[in-house]
Image: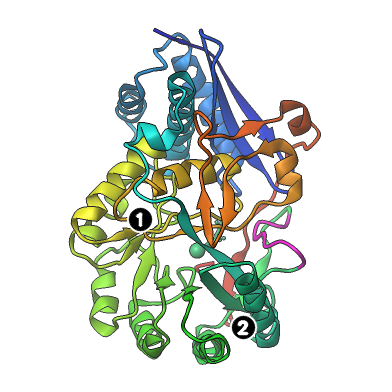
Amino acid sequence: MATITEAKVIITSPGRNFVTLKITTSDGVTGLGDATLNGRELAVASYLQDHLVPLLIGRDADRIEDMWQYLYKGAYWRRGPVTMTAIAAVDIALWDIKGKVAGMPVYDLLGGRARDGAMVYGHASGGSVAELLDDVARFRDRGYQAIRAQAAVPGSPGSYGVRHGAIYEPAATSLPEEQLWSTEAYLDFAPGYLTEVREKFGFDFHLLHDVHHRLTPTEAGRLGRRLEDLRMFWMEDPTPAELQESFRQIRQATTTPIAVGEVFNSIWDCQQLITERLIDYVRASVSHAGGITHLRRIFNLAELYQVRTGSHGATDLSPVSLSAAVHLDVTVPNFGIQEYMEHSPLTHEVFHTSYEFHEGALHPSSAPGLGVELDEEAAVRFPYNPKYLPVGRRTDGSVHDW
Ligand code: CS2
Ligand code: MG
């Protein structure tokens, strides 16, 4: 039996903040888990450092399921993004270790590949429609089979999902930036530019759009209906999902497929959405929804109801998360798509990866474990740099969902 001898929390900011858990066993094997929670990083770091690391030392590293149950049920206080991200980090690191010990990539531990690679979608965006169209062309030239399209809403500077410079990073300021939001302006504008994308590039690729939890179910139903002829792959996060039954109304209004889940942290957040088939894609992430062990349960439940997967993969999830997601993606029968936002070269100075992008898909490497290594010497060169996500305000000054 190999026991856990060390668990180290590594906080580094190569271009943006990441929290990583590195577990070492008595056999000298190491594994990595992602514990990054954008804008609330230190809360998870403390949860790990102060409350979980003391529990990990001396525990059997082989018993992943038991560890998950021990940390989830043992806390008494269940669920929540901080707890579930911390548990996820331990879980992902233990899968990485198990793969290295077995000499197998994690996808083989999960039953082997059901497909060669995971189709991904890239983020095309623009400060204007012309810029967006140029960006869509760029992604098509690079072989992307699926593209998400976002353009800045006129009169709403700082619109979400739009790149400023080379990289899209919403948590960009040391205190939350306040951004203006007008639902009317957005609803008048978005269907027009998505139509232009189809008119210019046709239908031989998948088109996606993120609403970022901005609409009411009534408004979302109206948007979905206007997008029906564009044969969208999905309309993402049309409305906040705390009220799962509200998706019934969107469903009844439109046949545009619905995706939701990047803020979910447990199967309970999507139980009704899945079992009543109120969504088409569940987008929970491996690092915020309890790790490979728990996300696999969500995906397995979804399979029973013909709901497909679409894991969140923004750059605020580290390359460790992305790799873990891709290993899981290639094994599940109900895989849909994987978000891929391409980490910056600076991030790759710290995280060395082995997954590969070609023909519009990410392919996990056959290296044992997850195939990601963290350069600790490089990590110390990038100290923590506090950053917050923006806050949205309506034109009357009241707070809106960002
Ligand atoms: C976005 C994210 O990737 C997405 O679909 O919604 O960029 C989201 O804004 C960030 O992950 C928040 O940290
Ligand atoms: Mg999103």
Q: Residue at x 34, y 79 (%)?
A: 256
Q: Residue at x 24, y 59 (%)?
A: 274
Q: Is residue 276 above or below residue 11?
A: below
Residue denoted by label 1: 335
Quarter residue 196 falls in:
bottom right
Q: Residue 168 colored magenta?
A: yes
Q: Is residue 98 above or below residue 249?
A: above
Task: Report the side of 329 relative to 179 (left or right).
Answer: left
- Secondary structure character of the magenta stretch overall: loop
The verdict on label 2 being within 8 Å of ligand 1 is no
- Other-residue count near label 2 (Cα within 10 Å), few / some / many at <14 / 14–19 / ≥20: many
Report x, y in % for residue 135: 67, 76
- Other-residue count near label 1 (Cα within 10 Å), few / some / many at <14 / 14–19 / ≥20: many
Task: Report the side of 232 relative to 175 (left or right).
Answer: left
Indicate the amino acid at tag 2: Val
Q: Residue at x 49, y 23 (%)?
A: 100
On-image quarter of the N terminus:
top left
Q: Which residues are magenta?
A: 165-173
Report x, y in % for residue 279: 29, 67
Q: Residue at x 67, y 37 (%)?
A: 352
Q: Residue furthest right?
A: 381
On-image quarter of the C terminus:
bottom right
Report x, y in % for residue 234: 40, 72
Mark 2 → mark 1, Cα distance in angstroms: 32 Å
Scheme of image coloration: rainbow
Give the number of the disc on residue 153: 2
Indicate the amino acid at tag 1: Phe
Q: How many marks?
A: 2
Report x, y in % for residue 143: 59, 67
Can residue 317 be seen in this snapshot?
A: yes
| Kind of element beneath mark 2 | loop
| Kind of element beneath mark 1 | loop
